[in-house]
Image: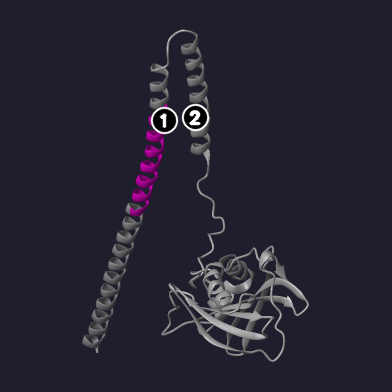
Amino acid sequence: MQGYKDTRIQGYRGRVAICDKRYAISDKRYAISDKRYAISDKRYAISDKRYAISDKRYAISDLRYAMSDMRYAPKGSGGRWGVMLGLAFIAALGLAVLILWLSPGPSGGNPPAPPIPLPLEPAARQAFRAAQEAAQAWQPDALPSSLSAHWQRIRGRWPTQIVWTIHFYSPSSGRLAVFLVEVGRTRMLRETVSPYPLPTFAEDQWRVDSPQAMEAWWGSGGEDFLARHSDAEVTLQLKPASPTDSRPEWVVTAMAGQQVQVVTISGVDGQRLP
């Protein structure tokens, strides 16, 4: 019985020794971790000192340039004026360096908005000029009825350029022509009799080009819509405001499944319309 008790006591002491070793290893690990954090803090402190030294060097360099200008100033009254101007410059420079030195650093303001991922070239105005020449060769009184462009991802990537579809209407003949414009190429897709007179927009009131219209849409919810819908398609159209109002207006339509976003922008002044 006594031997059994001694064996249990020895086993218990062995367990306690193992536990003490584990705690010792854990303490060493914490000590190593503390040393690493201390080294990291020293590195950051060294980095801050380097930036401070760099700012001082730039300030000293500016002062040296100012002193150089004073040395080359002509003697006499003009030289005195040069010295006075040089001293005024040094004082202003010193104040700027002091403000820079005491400033808390760059603020965490709003980051710049990401650029629109859709291609914006060729712009609508450029495509319209190319199509207008072909349309007037077709019918001298041809007037623009609408311009439209469409963006859709192919294998997860947006196209690299825009293809414009432009409709022209001839009031004298009552005919409609559809032109396709891409970079370096303009061609007529079809030409037919229109079943009714088509409204056309006033070209002389068209002042907002397609890149400006897309930027207005991007800042009016377009960025958020594309971020939330990876399968979104976007259509941009320039058309008359109504059958009786020839003022041009841009309509941007973004679609993703059952989700649709429509933004209307004036083609005259770029303001968003209700």
Residue plotted at (32% across, 52% down): 39
Spatial CA distance of label 1 from label 2 is 8 Å
Mark 1 or 2, nearer chain start: 1
Q: Which residue is mark 1?
A: 62
Q: Which residues are magenta?
A: 40-63
Q: Would you say 241 lies left or right of 32 here? A: right
Residue plotted at (43% across, 74% down): 160
Q: Is residue 24 above or below residue 255?
A: above
**Residue extending farthest left:** 3
**Residue extending farthest top:** 76
Residue 178: x, y in percent? Answer: 57, 83
Do the residues under discs 1 and 2 have CB atoms within 8 angstroms? yes
Residue 256: x, y in percent? Answer: 57, 86
Residue 52: x, y in percent? Answer: 40, 39
- Is residue 163 visible to the viewer in this orientation of the structure? no
Q: Is residue 193 above or below residue 73?
A: below
Q: Amino acid at mark 2?
A: Leu
> As rendered, which of 19 and 132 lies closer to the eye?
132
Residue plotted at (63% across, 78% down): 146
> As rendered, which of 47 and 109 lies closer to the eye?
109
Which label was assigned to residue 245?
Answer: none
Q: Amino acid at mark 1?
A: Asp
Question: Badge 2: how crowded within 10 Å, few (<14), some, or many (20+)?
Answer: some
